[in-house]
């Protein structure tokens, strides 16, 4: 049966339209997918480029290692490589002797990955020491830079001058940064770190959102302790003296356990080893108790913050913190006394100085932990004026004032105890870092006390203000009551 | 005039030519053919529409996830670059995990990356959301806003773990509307000229 003339020739246009539609659909989909992939790959490429450049740099270091510095590939003129394919991209390499420096080289690597170029720069120092083959090449400076700074000719470039300037600035900041590091290292609270860095006080949550269960578990996790290494047994201790001056190992031959997580104490005469062991144990107990106190203060404050100032929930932690603090102070006092005994038995000035520095560093560490813990627990006093402004009656404000006066008395007692125990080691030698840390801890406690006093003054002012308002309101109410009953209203 | 047959007349029906409709040869589509064709077209259109809708939805989800990943990676690239160009790690100590990191940057300025509550985002998402903020001191003894940068806007969790003296591992969970994205990176400090 034949087709009618009106339907003849329709198949081709229909198929054409269908093909066009399907092709359009497929192209649209693939475009979308491609744009998605390119977004993700773009950001992946950033790290990939660094790895590519690092590989290129490592290849150059390997070449320097395999020959000698004298025979390095860039000894007389810069070494160049262009368009070397590696790991799916390409790199250009330019290596030259650092202008004006011996045993130094500048390595520029420009990577190109999916059409995007990036530049990485290393300045290395070659340690020409045949006896130290593991540390021959030291990276002095690394920086990612714009690809346009890739050099084309030998000699000082603007970029190498910039590197010199940055290195000079680094050297200028070295001492300040070292001192800052000594103050920051014992701090475990970012707010305290920011305070040291003169940073802005971070915001707090305005509402009590539910805490993530992993948040507490994953943060503030202390470093894993060093493994306990058993002391050598009697049969392992050498009986004959070795070469050099005759020395005995503190605690050697004794079965009493040495502190596993303390640095080795200075070499001392055998007679004082028992004292030293006891001192080690006491100092360890003091520092551990201080750490425990700080952890409990921190945790108590965390619970109080999470509960919007609910200190009742934090009470068990604060009680534990106080107990740990007292234990730490007691052990610190004992340690100071033991240290004085040990010093009387020391055989040289160097030995005495080493012992003093060791004891003072441990005690200052404990002191600093307690000071930081206490400061953390008291840090809400910084907002004392704001807190007391929420009180609407003089009774409420007075209750806050009474509580705060009690808190200030507690704080002053803690300061007095701490000062008393730390005065025991006033004459001890201290490294500059330890002295700075002690001063910082002193300052932390002093600042906390000032904060507390300022909050109390604000509370007193608020009490007076509210009392005045209440009295005025009472007088007004009395006047209002008298007016209708007495009939003595002024005309 | 006689009645037209059921079949649809063509526009130029041969009446004009004087031919009787009863003798006209059947042409065009029958009603059944039209109905069947219409049904097939509707069915195919419905299936195609659903497919497009589904694809569009999944595309939007993927785009959102890609945007989140991209934003996160870009921000992390900044953080990674900062740390990579550092000279010394102050905190965390080796083996320690903390919600912040303190290190010396390329010119020995002490820098901290820390989490700060992001209250507007927390209000919107009804959960704790943080910002990752970077602050570095210039040792002038005063706060300078120029030294502060917000690296990430919406962080659910973030920890720094030191696994070596010159390396730090970042584990982070970022949030974007309903989607969360987890991130793990290990960064080695490159400027170790002072390390003996």
Image (cartoon, coloured by chain):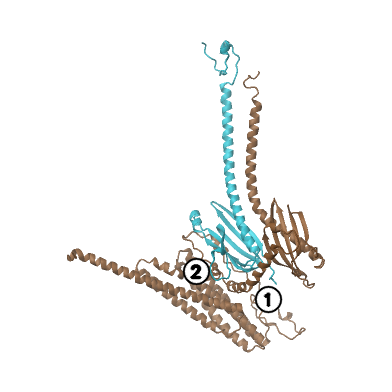
Chain colours: A brown, B cyan
- Of circles 2 and 1, which is in front? 2
Instruction: Give the crowd class for mark 2: few <14, some 14-19, many >=20 residues within 10 Å.
Output: many
- In the rendered image, which residue does mark 1 sit on? A230
- The residue closer to the viewer here, B21 or A77, is A77
- The residue closer to the viewer here, A338 or A491, is A491
- Position of residue A270 relative to residue A20, above or below, is below
Total numbered labels: 2
Q: Tag 1 or tag 2, which sits nearer the N-term?
A: 1
The location of residue A146, given as percent across then percent down, is 67, 58
- The residue closer to the viewer here, B128 or A75, is A75
Please state if A474 lies on the left or on the right of A144 as rendered: left
- Position of residue A244 relative to residue A39, above or below, is below
- In the rendered image, which residue does mark 2 sit on? A300
- The residue closer to the viewer here, A449 or A79, is A79
Residue A167: image tag: none
User: From this viewpoint, is residue B190 visible?
Assistant: no
* Quadrant housing residue A170: bottom right
The location of residue A59, given as percent across then percent down, is 77, 60
- Position of residue A164 relative to residue B13, above or below, is below
* Residue appearing at x 68%, y 78% in the figure: A231
Task: State the quadrant of the C terminus of chain A.
Answer: bottom left
* Residue appearing at x 48%, y 70% in the figure: A379
Disc 1 is placed on an element classified as: loop
User: From this viewpoint, is residue A422 visible?
Assistant: yes
Please state if A242 lies on the left or on the right of B70 as rendered: right
Task: State the quadrant of the N terminus of chain A.
Answer: top right
Disc 2 is placed on an element classified as: helix
Chain of the residue on which disc 2 is drawn: A
> Are discs 2 and 1 less than 8 Å apart at CB?
no
Chain of the residue on which disc 1 is drawn: A
The location of residue B190, given as percent across then percent down, is 68, 65
């Amino acid at each position: 049966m034949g087709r009618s003339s009106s339907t003849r020739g329709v198949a081709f246009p229909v198929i054409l339209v269908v093909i066009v539609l399907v092709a359009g659909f497929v192209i649209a989909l693939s475009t979308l997918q491609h744009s998605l992939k390119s977004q993700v790959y773009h950001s992946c490429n950033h790290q990939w480029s660094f790895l590519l450049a690092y590989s290129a740099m490592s290849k150059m270091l390997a070449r320097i290692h395999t020959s000698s510095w004298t025979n390095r590939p860039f000894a007389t003129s810069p070494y160049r490589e262009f368009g070397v394919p590696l790991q799916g991209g390409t790199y250009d390499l330019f290596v030259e002797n650092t202008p004006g420096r011996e045993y130094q080289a500048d390595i520029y690597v420009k990577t190109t990955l999916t059409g995007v170029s990036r530049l990485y720069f290393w300045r290395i120092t070659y340690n020409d020491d045949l006896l130290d083959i593991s540390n021959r090449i030291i990276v002095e400076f690394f920086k990612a830079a714009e690809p346009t700074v890739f050099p084309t000719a030998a000699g000082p470039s603007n970029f190498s001058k910039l590197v010199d300037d940055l290195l000079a600035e680094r050297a200028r900041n070295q001492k300040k940064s070292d001192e800052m590091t000594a103050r920051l290292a014992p701090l475990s609270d970012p707010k305290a770190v920011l305070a040291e860095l003169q940073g802005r006080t971070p915001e707090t949550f305005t509402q009590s959102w539910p805490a993530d269960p992993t948040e507490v578990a994953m943060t503030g996790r202390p470093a894993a302790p060093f493994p306990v290494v058993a002391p050598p047994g009697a049969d392992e201790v050498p009986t004959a003296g070795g070469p050099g001056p005759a020395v005995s190992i503190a605690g050697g031959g004794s079965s009493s356990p040495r502190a596993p997580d303390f640095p080795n104490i200075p070499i001392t005469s055998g007679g004082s080893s028992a004292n030293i062991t006891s001192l080690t144990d006491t100092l360890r107990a003091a520092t551990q108790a201080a750490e425990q106190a700080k952890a409990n203060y921190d945790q108590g404050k965390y619970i109080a913050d999470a509960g919007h100032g609910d200190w009742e929930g934090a009470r068990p932690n604060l009680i534990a913190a106080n107990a740990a603090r007292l234990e730490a102070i007691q052990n610190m006092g004992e340690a100071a006394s033991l240290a004085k005994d040990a010093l009387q038995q020391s055989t040289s000035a160097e030995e005495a100085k080493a012992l003093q520095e060791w004891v003072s560093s441990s005690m200052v560490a404990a002191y600093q932990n307690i000071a930081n813990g206490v400061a953390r627990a008291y840090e809400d006093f910084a907002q004392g004026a704001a807190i007391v402004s929420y009180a609407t009656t003089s009774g409420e404000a007075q209750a806050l004032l009474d509580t705060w006066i009690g808190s200030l008395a507690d704080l002053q007692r803690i300061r007095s105890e701490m000062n008393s125990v730390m005065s025991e080691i006033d004459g001890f030698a201290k490294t500059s870092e330890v002295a700075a840390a002690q001063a910082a801890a002193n300052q932390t406690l002093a600042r906390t006390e000032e904060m507390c006093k300022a909050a109390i003054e604000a509370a007193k002012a608020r009490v007076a203000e509210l009392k005045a308002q209440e009295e005025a309101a009472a007088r007004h109410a009395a006047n209002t009551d008298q007016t209708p009953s007495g009939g003595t209203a002024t005309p | 005039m006689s009645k037209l047959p059921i079949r649809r007349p063509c526009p130029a029906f041969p009446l004009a030519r004087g031919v009787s409709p009863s003798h006209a040869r059947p042409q065009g589509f029958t009603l059944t053919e039209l109905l069947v064709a219409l049904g097939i077209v509707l069915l195919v259109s419905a299936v195609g529409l659903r497919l497009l809708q589904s694809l569009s939805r999944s595309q939007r989800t993927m785009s959102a996830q890609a945007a989140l990943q991209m934003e996160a990676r870009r921000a992390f690239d900044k953080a990674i670059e900062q740390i990579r160009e550092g000279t010394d790690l102050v905190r965390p100590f080796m083996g320690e995990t903390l919600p912040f990191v303190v290190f010396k940057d390329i010119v020995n300025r002490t820098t901290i990356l820390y989490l700060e509550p992001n209250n507007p985002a927390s209000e919107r998402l009804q959960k704790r959301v943080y910002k990752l903020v970077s602050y570095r001191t210039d040792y002038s003894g005063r706060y300078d806003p120029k030294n502060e940068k917000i690296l990430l806007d919406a962080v659910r969790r973030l920890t720094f773990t030191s696994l070596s003296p010159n390396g730090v591992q970042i584990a982070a969970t970022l949030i974007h509307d309903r989607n969360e994205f987890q991130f793990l990176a290990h960064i080695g400090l490159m400027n170790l000229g002072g390390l003996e």
